[in-house]
Image: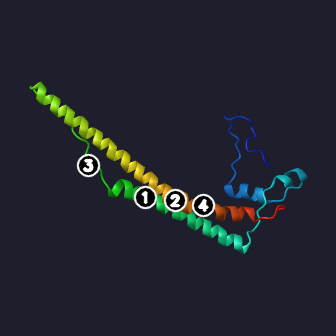
Amino acid sequence: MTNLNSGGGAGSDSVQKVQPREILQMGLEESPDEEHRKEKASAKELDPLQKVGFRLALTFFGYILAASIAIFFVSFRCIQLPPFPTPPSASTDPEHYKILADAYRQSADAYQQMAKLQVERATQLFQLVVASTILPVFSAILGYIFGSRKSGE
């Protein structure tokens, strides 16, 4: 390996600039000593059936993303909650103000329940569509891809 910093400090002016192409080339070159050869990463080309499985896994991953986005859109964008209720204005009559405050409290509670239902609906849809149907198939495909490699490789 080359010394990138010959001065040895962060404030040194004699820093050698290395292009990314050179770094890649240095990594691809064969190292003469045995120690560096063991550290090099090796890649094995996938079998044709594993390639098909990999593409199928990518397709299912895309399907998971699309389903998640669709669930979010349907749950939070298509079904809009009404605006949050406005608090009562100050009234001179205390009895009238109490009635308005009770009505506000009831409408705020109803709004909170509707918001909870909206989140619960999104969670249930996600569990039904993604977690219980798509995700097991995706896991099985990935298990096949990584499990079908021979133990010596």
**Residue farthest to the bottom?**
48
Q: Which residue has dot 1 on it?
A: 71
- Image mark for residue 82: 3
- Image mark for residue 136: 4
SS at circle 1: helix
| Cα–Cα gap, marks 4 and 2 | 9 Å
Label 1 near label 4: C-beta < 8 Å? no
Which residue type does callout 3 highlight? Answer: Pro
- Camera-nearest label, 3 or 4: 4
**First in sequence: mark 4 vs mark 2:** 2
The correct choice, above or below, for 49 with respect to 133 in the image is below
| Few, some or many residues within 10 Å of mark 2 (<14, 14–19, 20+) | some
In this rendering, position of residue 108 left or right of residue 71:
left
Foreground residue, 5 or 117? 117
SS at circle 3: loop
| Cα–Cα gap, marks 1 and 3 | 20 Å
In this rendering, position of residue 77 left or right of residue 145:
left
Which residue type does callout 1 highlight? Answer: Ile
- Image mark for residue 130: 2
